[in-house]
Image (spheres, rainbow, N blue to C red):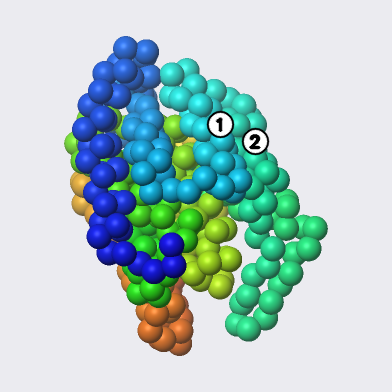
Amino acid sequence: MNKVNFTTILLMIFIPFVFVALITPFIKKIANHVGAMDIPDKRKIHKVPMPRLGGLGIYAGFLLGYMIFGEQTPRMNAILIGSFVLLITGIIDDVKPMKASHKLIGQLLAALIVVIYGNLLLRNISFFGINFDFGIWAYPITIAFILGCINCLNLIDGLDGLAGGISSIFFLTIGIIAYFQGRIGLSVVITFIMFGSTLGFLIHNFHPAKIFMGDSGSMFLGFIISVITLLGFKTIITSSIIIPLCILIVPILDTICAIIRRKLKGESIGTPDKSHFHHQLLRKNYGISFTVIIIYIITALFSAASVVWILVDKEIGYIIYGILLLGLMIFVFRTDILFEHRRSDKK
């Protein structure tokens, strides 16, 4: 498929959207039946047990879209197998929480499948006209990139609609760039299908959520985002990694800050806490919905900068990126996302 058929694109979005929107209430019943419930504790925001397994609905929409619009290739087979391994890992964790090390095994297996069987590799990156060829290091670098995307989405999934909304903005941005460049490939077919599937789930997941996506959803979304990015290096999304990294700036920054914060405290990287990006906004007495919308806006601004960078003018894009990054850095150093600030007890 070399040219964009706008009607086909709408169907790629609409069919998974409707399917996931309709199937999610049944998945909620399944989650209740098998005990896949997210129980509140002092670290969590919600106050009552919530069904998980929402990722199963997103995955079902992805499969339906692929069966209708996709083509069978060895690379697509690798993506399907890898994503299924990750889905099963997430479902097991949603029903009975696993150790982080055990989840990492499933994540690593999924990454190895698409890298070795699918031959999906981050072979080189171009920055400012300089090309970096990774050679044999392309294998561990690609695996690390996939694992990073998976866990970024997993860590940011702390409020109703947050991970799903950020992912939807990512898919929409990549889709817009693809459309205006006038071509379409495997990565873009997956992008539009995933956009519809994620939106269908968000109907049930935005605050007040009726179901959570669970690890089955957040890990799957992170995996697919990494796959779309890697496919884009050989197709039409971008010649550099700057676009996906900037669209996902909030979960990436949140993950980096979480690692540094926990290391400064002498804690394990996997230790859960309530100092993530969204927790900092909640501490300013913003409601859950408003906090999520603020993060949507930040993501959308970086996405708009990405569209400008790739479609309009790179210099203007860099300027917008710089202004937005400066704003984020100010936020980081004025909150407790890296380290706790001493506060006066005076009123």
Q: CA distance from mark 2 to mark 1?
A: 8 Å
Amino acid type indicated by mark 2? Leu
Label 1 packing within 10 angstroms: few (<14), some (14-19), many (20+): some
Whether residue 40 is visible: no
Residue reaching furthest to the right: 136
Q: Residue at x 41, y 86 (%)?
A: 313
Q: Position of residue 238 (x, y in %)?
A: 51, 71
Q: Position of residue 104 (x, y in %)?
A: 62, 34
Locate residue 61: give its quadrant: top left
**Quadrant into which the N terminus falls:** bottom left
Whether residue 3 is visible: yes
Residue behind mark 1: 85
Between 237 and 218, which is closer to the camera in this rendering?
237
Between 247 and 189, which is closer to the camera in this rendering?
189
Label 2 packing within 10 angstroms: few (<14), some (14-19), many (20+): some
Does residue 241 appear to the left or right of 38 in the view shown? right
Amino acid type indicated by mark 1? Val
Q: Which numbered tag is attached to residue 39?
A: none
Q: Are marks 2 and 1 in contact (CB under 8 Å)?
A: yes
Between 317 and 277, which is closer to the camera in this rendering?
317
53 is higher (above) or lower (below) than 281: above
Q: Position of residue 222 (x, y in %)?
A: 48, 46
Element assignment for label 2: helix
Q: Residue at x 73, y 58 (%)?
A: 138
Between 74 and 141, which is closer to the camera in this rendering?
74
Does residue 216 appear to the left or right of 50 in the view shown? right
Q: Residue at x 39, y 69 (%)?
A: 3
Q: Position of residue 267 (x, y in %)?
A: 60, 38
153 is higher (above) or lower (below) than 335: above
Residue behind mark 2: 109
Q: Residue at x 52, y 45 (%)?
A: 72
Element assignment for label 1: helix
